[in-house]
Amino acid sequence: MRPATQRVRALQAVMLRLTVDPAYNARVYREDSLSIDLPDGRYTLSPDDLQMVRAVDHRAWTTDRFRRARLTQAVIEEYLLTTALVGVAEVDAFFGTEAFARVLTHRGSMAEACGDWLADRVARDVRPFVQLEAAVVRARRGVRDDGPGLVSSPGMEGLRLPEGTLSHWQRGLGELGPNAFESVAQGRRWQAPRAGGSRENLLIERQDGGGLGVHVLSAGVVGVLAFCRSPRSRSEVSREARRLKVPKKQVSGLLRRMLDEELLIER
């Protein structure tokens, strides 16, 4: 990325974050040095950059008082049961984190990043439901990183969850009622049931009509799908399949079938 492009990307990210993060707003107007993580390294704002940003009254960045609320609403709509489990305030807190800042600088998916951030901080019994709703988000979005190698087909998400997670999730959404968003936005909570001891291996698949299909597959297939969310070399995938306890003599056949069935694509 050229220096001029770096500067523009960094300033855009700073200005966007100023509109939703009061703590960051205070930091920008207080600190003498400010660096931004970009895809190809860090950019440190120059004195001229800081002067340009600070020429605007700090209060002007937040004249749209409902911007953050709209962002929170957009995430809640993707994570209805998660929100009922953790509360609206926990979802809203995402917009004051470095995880959100990375979305701005790397132009990633806000909903995916929020799911990953929540999964890293919630209680153990809540995590499977966050992971399931994050997989649904990724399947609907259907985007894969660039690069050569084997990669899961866009719209195909494999995940291993405690037994019963899927049925509990479906039941939980039903209990929230036909107006689930309004229910959780007004503070409706849901208690996660105790997880089963064994695992269920699921494929979440985006279908042509826009809906989602859920399939139960083998642990090896699902594990390889999850591993190949980013492009991997064939040797890396083979080693992961062995780690997943796929017999050595069956690894090549497994990968061939997954390619034939378009669960994987090779670039």
Image (tube, rainbow, N blue to C red):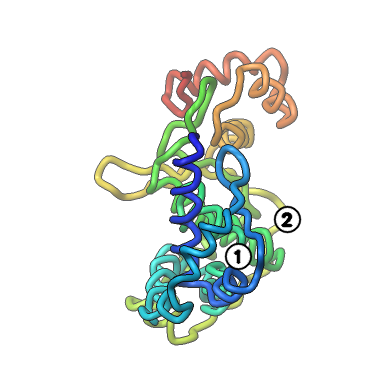
Q: Amino acid at mark 2?
A: Gly
Query: Residue 254 location in percent, x, y?
Result: 57, 20
**Quadrant assignment, res 245:** top right
Q: Amino acid at mark 1?
A: Thr
Label disc, if present, on residue 197 of the rendered structure: 2
Which of disc 2 and disc 1 is earlier in sequence?
Answer: 1
Residue in the picture at 64% in, 61% down? 127
Query: Residue 110 location in percent, x, y?
Result: 46, 57
Element under label 2? loop
Label 1 neighbourhood size at 10 Å, few (<14), some (14-19), many (20+)? some
Q: Could one spot residue 172 in this view of the protein?
A: no
* Rendered position, 266 above or below 90: above
Left or right for 128, reference 107: right
Query: Residue 220 location in percent, x, y?
Result: 63, 31
Q: CA distance from mark 1 to mark 2?
A: 34 Å
Tag 1 and tag 2, C-beta contact below 8 Å: no
Quickly name the residue at label 1.
97
Left or right for 181, reference 11: left
* Rendered position, 238 above or below 146: above
